[in-house]
Amino acid sequence: MSELGAALRLERSGHDWTGELSDDWAIGTATNGGLLMALAGKAAAGCSVAGGGHRDPLSLSAVFLSPGGPGPVLLRPTILRVGRSMTTAQVSVIQQDDGDEVERLRAHVTLGDLDRYAEPVLKTVAAPSIPSPEQCASAKDAPPNVLLDSGFLRRLDLRMDPATVGWALGTPSGAGELRGWLRLADGTDFDAVSLLLALDAFPPVSFDLGSVGWVPTVEFTGYVRGTPAPGWLQLRLHTEHVAGGLLNEDCQVWDSTGRLVAHSRQLASARFPASTAD
Amino acid sequence: MSELGAALRLERSGHDWTGELSDDWAIGTATNGGLLMALAGKAAAGCSVAGGGHRDPLSLSAVFLSPGGPGPVLLRPTILRVGRSMTTAQVSVIQQDDGDEVERLRAHVTLGDLDRYAEPVLKTVAAPSIPSPEQCASAKDAPPNVLLDSGFLRRLDLRMDPATVGWALGTPSGAGELRGWLRLADGTDFDAVSLLLALDAFPPVSFDLGSVGWVPTVEFTGYVRGTPAPGWLQLRLHTEHVAGGLLNEDCQVWDSTGRLVAHSRQLASARFPASTAD
């Protein structure tokens, strides 16, 4: 089983699904939010299919309530609506803390059949032209950084367009854009569920504007628009409004055939040194 | 009291809030989804403030479960988290149907203090340069259209950039973009809560790609980024990916000072005539 497959392994337990969060997918002390979202998407799909509903996550919107940590995790899905072409579910991601259930995130997930939405493509946006993965900067070559030196990033092969890595060397471009490539380090390909992790796998776009420290997500909404072909994913992150330490971070993901397969927007909270903020 | 103020009037009833949906805010037979979202945002704010939490909606993400109609409406907010700078709530919008409670939408709402996020602005996007409201096409002058001839649109003063009204005359541009101005017909100004309605008040952007009929929202997420100054709002809607009848619709809203005060993305389902789809 692949590393990500193991991290997303769930067992049914009555109405709930149980899994295990591992340090392997932590950034600092917290489990990566994208992993929690992929788990929520997988539990929603499992619950939907068990009830005769739809299989593929089309949309997932999540609010983050507390940071996840290593240990058992409980996924509690509820079906809100079963329609002809879509099923809507709510999922809570829960961990025990001193015997009490503590909610990590709550998500609404819409499920459908991605094949149905493959064609015709009436409008799309092409991936930006960037250097090949071999010509990009690997996260492995980055200067030591507590946020980057994480179990999570060791499980990814993340390559940044050299034009958007200035922030890692102390010279952010100020453009508010990151571009690059992503695949899983063990060679496993992404699927519709794990695209939810890919959408939140890059460093925060606010780093390109000089933000420091952690960038907590307030709200995240991702749309999966297609089943990704095997191979590298190409990502572009950008922001359009950064004010008072709050910013939107938009992510676009294209598969190796150049098809847009997912896009997301999150509202996040970033800290900027006074010199940047003035 | 303004027309929108009356439509958003809520009374507390135990843990719930009660209001009334009027035909005045219908499009076809269904209550406008933006009005339901503004009601959800207002109930979340009321519940939050009553519990010592935060006041302004910063984000609202909603899944639509059934169409709202005229009659009493119940708003059921639950506080999920009270943090130092933000409060997170869930709100169900409910109507009675033959004595049963039927959920119209469910939303997650993050609340905070918008003043806190006003400055500094480190990056933003300017409103596109378009003709003034006086030089734009008023919805009142449009050819008769069952979708446009609605109580909802009579309560708005909606002006479209002449460059993006071809669809109303049967010649959509194909660009997937609508631009224009919005204010309330009775002259009331928008506030943080009613921006949630503004974000979903324009005709669907898919009309500019030749879609026909109604465009149901699958998921909607809006971020309020500032308290709007009095006067006209300027809106830009665009889509980046339309495939198999599903599209994202992104909306940006600037106030009369040119400040970006809200932006949103929704996943929606549109029908295209075969000739467009081929």
Image (tube, coloured by chain):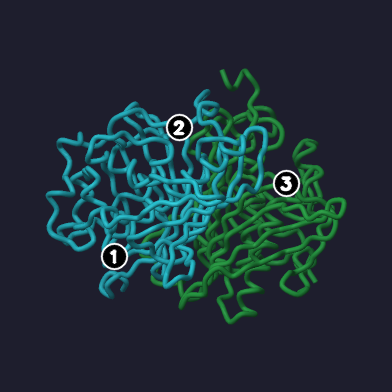
Chain colours: A green, B cyan
Q: Mark 3 = which residue?
A: A66
* Side of A66 where B58 appears, left or right: left
Give the vertical position of A175 relative to A93 (above or below). Answer: above
The chain to which mark 3 is attached is: A
Please identify the quadrant where the N terminus of chain A is shown: bottom right
- Residue B204 lies in quadrant: bottom left
Q: Are marks 3 and 2 in contact (CB under 8 Å)?
A: no
Q: Mark 2 = which residue?
A: B226
- Amino acid marked by disc 3: Ser
Residue at the spot 26% in from the left edge and 53% down from the top edge: B24
Q: Residues within 10 Å of mark 2 (few under 14, many from 20)?
A: many
Please identify the quadrant where the C terminus of chain A is shown: top right
Give the vertical position of A168 relative to A235 (above or below). Answer: above
**Camera-side mark, 1 or 2:** 1
Nearer to the camera, A156 or A133:
A156
Dot placed on the residue nearer the N-terminal end, 1 or 2:
1
Residue at disc 1, secondary structure: loop
Nearer to the camera, B106 or B169:
B106
- Amino acid marked by disc 2: Gly
Spatial CA distance of label 3 from label 2 is 26 Å
Nearer to the camera, B252 or B243:
B252
* Side of B145 where A28 appears, left or right: right
Determine if marks 1 and 2 fall on one subunit.
yes
Across and down, in percent, residue B222 comes to 47, 47
Q: Residues within 10 Å of mark 1 (few under 14, many from 20)?
A: some
Q: Mark 1 = which residue?
A: B29
- Residue B207 lies in quadrant: bottom left
Across and down, in percent, residue B128 comes to 31, 37
Q: Residues within 10 Å of mark 3 (few under 14, many from 20)?
A: some
Nearer to the camera, A251 or B200:
B200
